[in-house]
Image (spheres, helix red, strand yellow):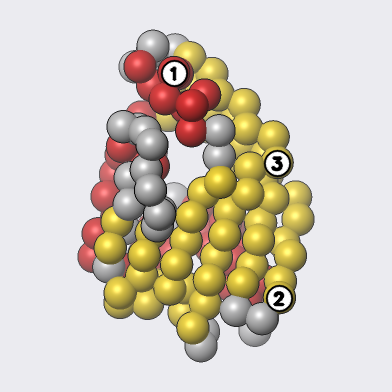
Amino acid sequence: MSHADTVRGIYEAFARGDVAAILAQLADDVEWEYGVSSTTVPWLQPRRGRDAVPGFFETLFPAIEIHRFEPKELLEGGDLVVAIIDFEFTIRATGRRVVEEDEAHLWRFAGDKVVRFRHRADTHQQQLAYDG
């Protein structure tokens, strides 16, 4: 199975809400949302280790209503998969809608496991919607 196939499977699991299937594709020491965080949005916070990743889903799923989540392109090269996503959702607490067109997701692999993941999203838009 290619890395792009693995990412495709992760997105299928996301659509089903199958967190266990996603976690099975992650390395024990995965870096989830690596790099500097410039937002207080709970689902955009860095997490370290597979045991910390469920926190992403625990903050995301109850907080938003998903209207569209469409992986449009999966670009693979070596140990990297870049996914281009259209994502549209409403933050339940504020009623604010977020429209992300061509959001990029970066998936880095070591062997057959994801070792790093990051959203390249409009964090400012998400922060404003989250704050209301």
Q: CA distance from mark 2 to mark 3?
A: 19 Å
* Residue 42: image location, x then y, percent: 31, 37
Residue type beneath disc 3: Asp
> Real-space Cα distance between discs 3 and 1?
19 Å
* Image-quadrant location for residue 87: top right
Q: Position of residue 3 (x, y in %)?
A: 62, 76
Q: Residues within 10 Å of mark 1 (few under 14, many from 20)?
A: some
Checking the image for residue 102, the label placed there is 3
Q: Earlier in the sequence, mark 2 or mark 3?
A: 2
Judging by the rendered image, the residue that carries numbered circle 1 is: 128
Q: Is residue 131 left or right of residue 3?
A: left
93 to 15, vertically: above or below: above
Residue 128 versus residue 80 in the image, above or below: above
Q: Is residue 15 visible?
A: no
- Give me the C-alpha separation between circle 2 and circle 1: 34 Å
The residue under label 1 is which amino acid type? Leu
Q: Are marks 2 and 3 in contact (CB under 8 Å)?
A: no
